[in-house]
Image (spheres, rainbow, N blue to C red):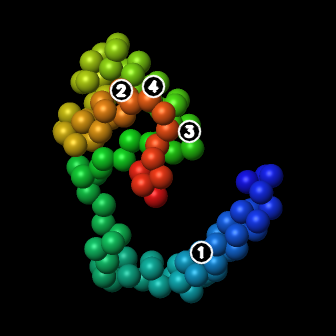
Amino acid sequence: MIVDRRHRMETGARVRRFVQTHWQPREVARRYLQLVEEEIPPSWVFDPSETSYVYGCCAPDSWIRELVRRVVQTAGAGGLMVSDKPDLERQLLAFGNEGGQRSETAAA
């Protein structure tokens, strides 16, 4: 991003629009009111048992992949502590065995 001015400017504009749309005081207050009045849209609800995202946050894929490999090597699949989420466990085990970086479709 630092070397690509156009990408930096486009990303900055998208971020600015997002903040202006979603984080204005009136918009935040409206969402809090929805919570208070128990009018919670389905899009706000997240079921952790349905998680299958393995890429983590703010860390390179290679680092996460190596961490998964080490945990499995040391403690087996149970060491991942996600046996209650079989799809996530399968995804993590597959991810730990992969090489390379995440695909564009997985990154979206």
Looking at the rendered image, the disc whose residue lies closer to the viewer, 2 or 1, is: 2
The answer to which of marks 2 and 3 sits earlier in the sequence is 3
Q: Nearer the viewer, residue 16 or 28?
A: 16
User: Answer yes or no: do the residues labelled 1 and 3 have beta carbons within 8 Å?
Assistant: no
What separation in Å lies between label 4 and label 3 (alpha carbons)?
11 Å
Q: Amino acid at mark 4?
A: Leu
The residue drawn where x is 48% and y is 33% is 100
Q: Amino acid at mark 3?
A: Ala
Label 4: how many residues lie within 10 Å, few (<14), some (14-19) or many (20+)?
A: few
The answer to which of marks 4 and 2 sits earlier in the sequence is 4
Q: Nearer the viewer, residue 41 or 50?
A: 50
User: Answer yes or no: do the residues labelled 2 and 3 have beta carbons within 8 Å?
Assistant: no
What separation in Å lies between label 1 and label 3 (alpha carbons)?
23 Å
Q: Examine the rendered structure and indicate whether residue 37 appears above or below residue 43.
A: below
Which quadrant of the figure contains the N terminus? bottom right
Give how far across and how far down residue 24 sits, in percent.
Answer: 61, 81
Q: Amino acid at mark 2?
A: Asn
Give the residue number, with chain letter if any, for mark 1.
Answer: 18
Give how far across and how far down residue 82 sits, in percent.
Answer: 26, 35
Give how far across and how far down residue 96 sits, in percent.
Answer: 37, 28
The answer to which of marks 2 and 1 sits earlier in the sequence is 1
Give the residue number, with chain letter if any, for mark 4.
Answer: 67
What separation in Å lies between label 2 and label 3 (alpha carbons)?
18 Å
Give the residue number, with chain letter if any, for mark 2.
Answer: 97
**SS at mark 3 in the image:** loop
What separation in Å lies between label 4 and label 2 (alpha carbons)?
11 Å
> Seen in the image, is 101 located left or right of residue 93?
right
Give the residue number, with chain letter if any, for mark 3.
Answer: 59
The residue drawn where x is 70% and y is 69% is 10
